[in-house]
Amino acid sequence: MKFAGIIAEYDPFHNGHAWQLAQARALGAQRVAVAMSCGLTQRGALPLLPEAVRVQAALACGADLVFALPAPCACAGAEAFARAGVRILAAAGCDALVFGAETPDTALLQKAARVLCSEAYRTALRQHLAAGARSFAAARQAAVQALCPGSDVAALLDKPNNNLAVEYCKAIIELNVEMQPIALPRQGADHGQALTESAHAAFASASALRALWAEGGAAALAPYVPEKALKLYKQAEYDGKYTDFAVMGHCELALLRAACTEQAPFAAVRGVSEGLEHRLENAVRETASLPALLDALTTVRYPRARMRRLAMDAALGYTAQTPALPPYLHLLGARKETLPLPGETALPLSHSLARLARENETCAQMAAAQSRASDLGALCRAKPEPMGGIYRQKIIFLTN
């Protein structure tokens, strides 16, 4: 391994992320690139902090290059999220993918990925879904268990980071890229675990840190984030460069309500099936807040995370025509000594989104989709900002 890749949200960057970067170095990586969620997150919401702050934190704490994982790809389920991240890092020339997992057994994770790539699995999955499985996750686990009875493969899918790790391995197989998957033990708190539930003094989950920020501001994150990152967070708080999630909820619901002036407003939204477009329209018309909307949409069959992504997709007009994979490499930041990249990249590369948008129609579509998310984020900050910032954003350079 010479050029390691990491797929992350850094929402916000914390001690666990810094540990992962250090481990990639310890395993021999001479450069580390990150594909970082830009504009939206996998949970279907805006990030707490804008890209500029998160990129600076990553570079200051060990990353060499940070590429944008475009908003439509970031606001996606595990499979699509993983494929997009792997596509970016492979196109940049990474020869390894480093990720955390509750079960850091790379061989076992790869075995699970090969099962999920098989036609036998797809057949078994369809059968379990047709038989009325309570959710897609339950159907998937039952299908894997049927194909691998008595093995540990199905049990892997019970844990969120294992699940994402398997999708990373699967993406490497399906995209046919030369990348070595390297699983690391997840450090500290579990995904979504509250601070009071964790016995790890120096580590906290990103969701716990967002909750801590809401209660006590940036200073409250001090025990759980690197000192260099904390300094950036305090400045961002002072400047009002953080998301007001109450405002986000109102703005998102306003966009959804505005769409309801049209007939069948959500029929073209990507991922709708089984009448979800009608369910969403009814919920938009009958609720007065984003939490109430999500409560109305969520069932055992339709998990809240999926409904959050569906609502955001509908608000921003992401349809089946929105590109599913990144068509370019949008470089957000870099350590100067790591540039230029060795060799040709497999996708158009630039720090300028405007320049990338001119490459071809697919690039233009993705840039426009990114802009809609970034403009929403700019409006929903504690100190709102004008439209178009993603097109004016300059690359962030760090020098030693």
Image: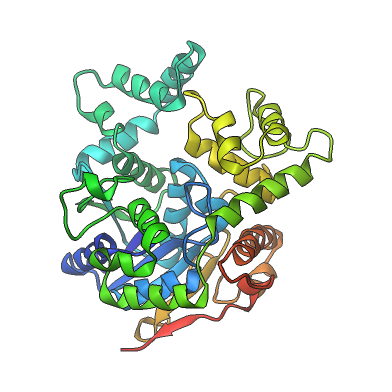
Q: Which of the 4 image quarters holds residue 10? A: bottom left
Viewer-closest of 344 and 269: 269
Q: Residue 52 location, x and y as percent?
A: 48, 74
What's the colour scheme? rainbow
* Residue 253, placed above or below residue 229: above
Q: Is residue 10 visible?
A: no
Residue sitting at 43 percent across and 67 percent down?
Answer: 92
Q: Measured from the top left, where is residue 106 in percent x and y?
A: 22, 45
Residue 320 visible, this angle: yes
Tell me the quadrant of the picture where the N terminus can be found.
bottom left
| Residue at image location 16% in from the left, 57% down from the top | 201
* Residue 327: % across, % down: 58, 59
Residue 280 in the figure: left or right of residue 163: right
Tell me the quarter of the image containing the C terminus. bottom left
The residue at the far bottom in this view is 400
Residue 170 vs 234, above or below: the answer is above
Q: Name the outermost residue toward the top.
A: 131
Taking 93 as reference, is 332 left or right?
Answer: right
The x, y position of residue 119, in whole percent, is 43, 25
Name the residue rendered at 33%, 37% in the picture: 113
